[in-house]
Amino acid sequence: MLPSKRSAGSDGAQSKRPKLGDNGASNGTRNGVPPAIDEDLHSRQLAVYGRETMRRLFASDVLVSGLNGLGAEIAKNLALAGVRSVTVHDVKDVDMWDLSANFFLSDQDIGNNRALACVSKLQELNNAVLVSALTQELTKEHLSKFQAVVFTDISLDKAYEFDDYCHSHHPPIAFIKAQVSGLFGSVFCDFGPEFTVLDVDGEDPHTGIIASISNDSPAMVSCVDDERLEFQDGDLVVFSEVQGMEELNDGKPRKVKNARPFSFTIEEDTGSYGVYSKGGIVTQVKEPKVLRFKSLRDAMKDPGDFLLSDFSKFERSPVIHLAFQALDSFRKEHGRYPTAGCEQDAQSFLKFVADINEASIDSKQEKIDDKLLRHFASGSRAVLNPMAAMFGGIVGQEVVKACSGKFHPLYQFFYFDSVESLPTYQLDPQDLKPSNSRYDAQISVFGSKLQKKLQDANIFIVGSGALGCEFLKNLALMGVSCSSKSKLTITDDDVIEKSNLSRQFLFRDWNIGQAKSTVAAAAARAINPSLQIGALQNRACPDTESVFHDTFWDGLDVVINALDNVNARMYMDMRCLYFQKPLLESGTLGAKCNTQMVIPHLTENYGASRDPPEKQAPMCTVHSFPHNIDHCLTWARSEFEGLLEKTPNEVNSFLSNPTQYSAAMRKAGDAQARELLERVSECLGKERCITFEDCITWARLRFEDYFSNRVKQLTFTFPEDASTSTGTPFWSAPKRFPRPLQFSATDSSHIHLIMSASILRAESFGIAIPDWAKNTSKLADAVNKVAVPEFEPKKGVNIVTDEKATNLSSASVDDVAVIDDLLSKLEECAKNLPPGFQMKPIQFEKHS
């Protein structure tokens, strides 16, 4: 149960800090009890982070100081991620410039404290997170209550003071200083003198199936050649299931040397070991990594290597490092930022850079780019929304790393610039002057001419999921499509689900079931009432070209994809290519992402280059001889779609028009038609479910069939000592001899599979799901009552072993007769169904 929330906007102290691990990461408990994870809400995060990381995150308290656009983005991301509490701090009031980057704010907030203006809207994002505000000057004592503190608007002197305190605190408090100034941004991380990264990359350990091991020093290990090894020199690996050379099965980590695509060596003399005969798995051992962060004070003098995002700008980070220091000095002396386009301020700023560079003994720069620094100074006051959104994502992820120990953190400075975004023409200083509008920050960087172009632009966004929400928010803040001449069109045929709320921040729990595009459009219009937006619920595809017709496409200026599948991306790319429209393409996969800007006659289009096709495993491998997790996942996905989507669709096709369906099956008259009818007949006959208990029985018998009976039949047909026609052992690598599973209601993986399968089966039959369906003890009682018949393997069963086979069904001379018989059975089954009965097909993505 979650602790009670403090009232929004309170200046009260945070609750007592939870027990910590050695490096300050929370151990993931609240009063000794692991926090409950709402799996419906955080399903995607669970897949990326894992349960332990999520528990640590849920027990972490974070301070975000400085609620400019960057601070708002960071706080938003942390609230969505589900930390225990977010405290927002600011002593400044909202002004007109804040409206260009902070999507929580509106005209009515001008003159109010920035933290107080944001806190209630921040709370709406996640009711499980404690959100509060601080409006007084921060002291070091305030910081002791947090696992991580983030500053977005702080002087260098104050940053030194706070970081020294955090660095020396026991346990250390993760300190992050981030700043966006125009088209330039910076991040500094200090997670303490000894920070342990528990999982460097978040990837599953790499594995390989052994083909041979030499009796030699060093020993050569060769693996099967159907999959490249991902090991690198220096990796540690362990061996298991090795036959013959059992000495390697001792669990001792061994270091990889001379890593090759299908082989490597180990520094070990295996000459006296047994001779390798067969089998064996080699698995990477992932070790924690200890990082020793320098304090900000020390790192500023000796920054070391900068993290690079663009290798064409290799020499730029040291210059930007000087620029941010010079900006701090300028603000300290003048009490303000440099004025956009002011030559006097530019000269003063350049003087500060030169003085700081001269004082830098070990890191002095021989060449200074004055033009770059002038751009920096001119736009330094502006917190631009796209920059804030980008750095908000980066810093939010760094906080997750600090609180959980998952993924390698940024070490220690990161600088980024996007000066190539500036207009190609010379900017007139008069064009940079503020006009007392919400776009003044942007105008100070890009000029009023470009701002007008943005406001007059016609935009088409396809998709309003996680990326679509981000794009809409960004465009609204930037003033894109905000004039009477323009229009932004967004389309999405999906509706809002609970799992969307942890990343699609324009939606709230009261929007569940509503159209995504409609809700997103209304939320974007609330951010900027001038936004000219229209929402559609059409899928962009050949079937809707009467909606998205030639006239519609001719009027567009830019197209933005926010899609989640390749086929839709290819279609949109084709349309943009035909109509010669710029396309912004992007996508995410867990903690990874990509983006591609497609400009007609300048860049290649999305479809011009494709990833090499993934190697498809043979059908017989997936169904009978899997040897890696991908094979198991492919099999599981295939079974899910067959049982819960394809078969219900076939059932509905038959029930909607039995005569037409029967005629089509008789006309096909092949093994595939016979197999479809067998599935439909089983579904409406002996496997038909009427009660939830029937669904439990069905799930339990499926378990027995999948993981016991089929394995018993396979090993009966091909015993462990079986040989091929050439005399070689049948169960040679990469084949792995399987063992049947014995069901146990006390095994969590077994009972959770029964739970999920029962609930899904009930949904597909329209059966009410009882409250106790997710109670494992009550479910176990019900499962144990299921009578499971004894299984006896049969002789003469044909199991496909041909890797070239594309179908596991075998043709029969009696296919036509069997089809007639099955259709007769179906007609009898249909008589026992309630009038108008239809099944509910379930798409896999909806339950991911």
Image (spheres, grey):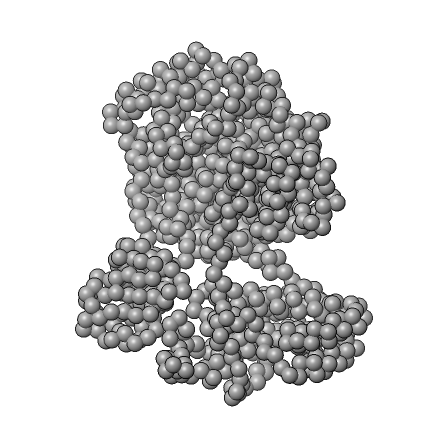
Q: Quadrant of residue 206?
A: bottom left
Quadrant including the N terminus: bottom right
Q: Nearer the viewer, residue 155 or 366?
A: 366
Residue 11 vs 690, above or below: the answer is above
Q: Tell me: 179 left or right of 214.
A: right
Residue 710 visible, this angle: yes
Q: Tell me: 710 left or right of 138.
A: right
Q: Residue at x 71, y 50 (%)?
A: 543
| Residue 549 image offset from top left, x and y in percent | 72, 41
Residue 450 vs 508, above or below: the answer is above
Report the residue that reaches farthest toward the top.
344
Q: Residue at x 23, y 65 (%)?
A: 219
| Residue 70 image offset from top left, x and y in percent | 50, 33
Q: Nearer the viewer, residue 189 or 452?
A: 452
Q: Nearer the viewer, residue 668 or 279?
A: 668
Residue 399 vs 28, above or below: the answer is above
Q: Nearer the viewer, residue 330 or 93?
A: 330
Q: Quadrant of residue 583?
A: top right
